[in-house]
Amino acid sequence: MPPRIPGVQRLGTFSICLRPAVKPSTPSLLPLTQTASLSQKEKKRMAKQDPYRWAQMQQRKAAHLKIRERIEAARAIEHGDPIRGITTPFVESFDSAGQAPLSKPPVDDEGNPLEEPHELPTSPHVLNNLIHKEELESAIENAYTLTRPMEPIVGSVSSREYAKQIRLHEEHHAKAVEALQRITHMDNGSANDKLHANIRRCVETFGRHQTDLILTPKALSRGQEREERPVRGGPDTGSSEVQIAILTAKIRALANELEKGRGYKDKVGKRDLRLMLHRRQRLLRYMDRKERGSDRWKHMVETLGLSPATWKEQIST
């Protein structure tokens, strides 16, 4: 009996596809890398299947995390604080209005200092009640001369009585000098008196009537000529660096007060702090455009400890 030959199937059973065939991807010679985190089930399976490899992975992860923490801490220190920036000796001297020669180191719960005190820049000529030290010395000298008993005419007063008057005058003058020194010392001044003293110190340190004689001016661009400016009639109190220094002193004083007691509830103080921070930020951005890289900019940033956090990013307190 001849074999049975199957017939041709119906055309309706064919599926015709006109799309081109997908070419297989070229195999990559690079090692396979894991792009997604492992699930908990996969981690348990790997730890049970190859514990030595799992321990090595955990050690590498811990080492990477330590390196990341160290790098982030260094970046945070370099970036600084938006309120205080980087504390410098000149900024620390704002607390005593330039009268304390050494800093106050932080202490632990038992009162032991955590670090050694360091030297601070001082301004002994700045006294309370807006008085200069030379003015006080000149006034004391004139008062001594005016109140000193006159030499007696021959025969009018005995030498013993005149010596007694001179001795009483010396005692009274010493008491008056001691009283004046106590009155004009900054330790007996209020917060407003210290603020005025710090403003005077900022004008003396950053005023262009002083810095123009010491610092090199910014280099001019090609084809630009330096303009001759008129001679200043007095101390510089309105330049950007002076205003930034004054705002830094006010910000530090207000921040110190808000950290005490129940200062965290002082909403008006916080608002004033934000306003001063944003005002200083605008002035710093202006100085960044005008004086970036100059000796004036470096002197201001290094002395006041102004970090990038004080002017580069949004400040929110």
Image (cartoon, grey):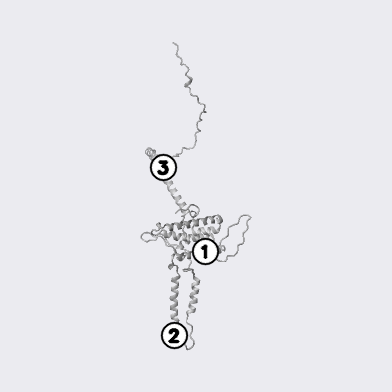
Image coordinates for residue 128, horizontal then vertical, percent: 46, 68
Which SS class for mark 2? helix
Q: Residues within 10 Å of mark 1 (few under 14, many from 20)?
A: many
Cα separation, mark 1 vs mark 3, equals 59 Å
Mark 1 and mark 2 lie on one chain; the one further toward the N terminus is 2
Cα separation, mark 3 vs mark 2, equals 99 Å
- Check disc 1 and report the residue beneath it: 203
Q: Are marks 1 and 3 in contact (CB under 8 Å)?
A: no
Front residue of 27 and 248: 248
Image coordinates for residue 287, horizontal then vertical, percent: 54, 56
Specify the label residue 294 is tagged with.
Answer: none
The relative height of residue 27 versus residue 276 in the rendered view (above or below) is above
Mark 1 and mark 3 lie on one chain; the one further toward the N terminus is 3
Q: Quadrant of the C terminus?
A: bottom left
Mark nearest the camera among 3 and 2 is 2
Mark 3 and mark 2 lie on one chain; the one further toward the N terminus is 3
Residue at image position (51%, 55%) is 282
* Amino acid type of the residue tagged 2 in the rendering: Glu
Asked whether the viewer can see residue 247, the reply is yes
Front residue of 134 and 190: 190
Specify the label residue 57 is tagged with.
Answer: 3
Residue 110 located left or right of residue 18: left
Front residue of 216 and 54: 216
Q: Residues within 10 Å of mark 3 (few under 14, many from 20)?
A: few
* Amino acid type of the residue tagged 1 in the rendering: Val
Residue at image position (39%, 41%) is 54
Which SS class for mark 1? helix
- Check disc 2 and report the residue beneath it: 161
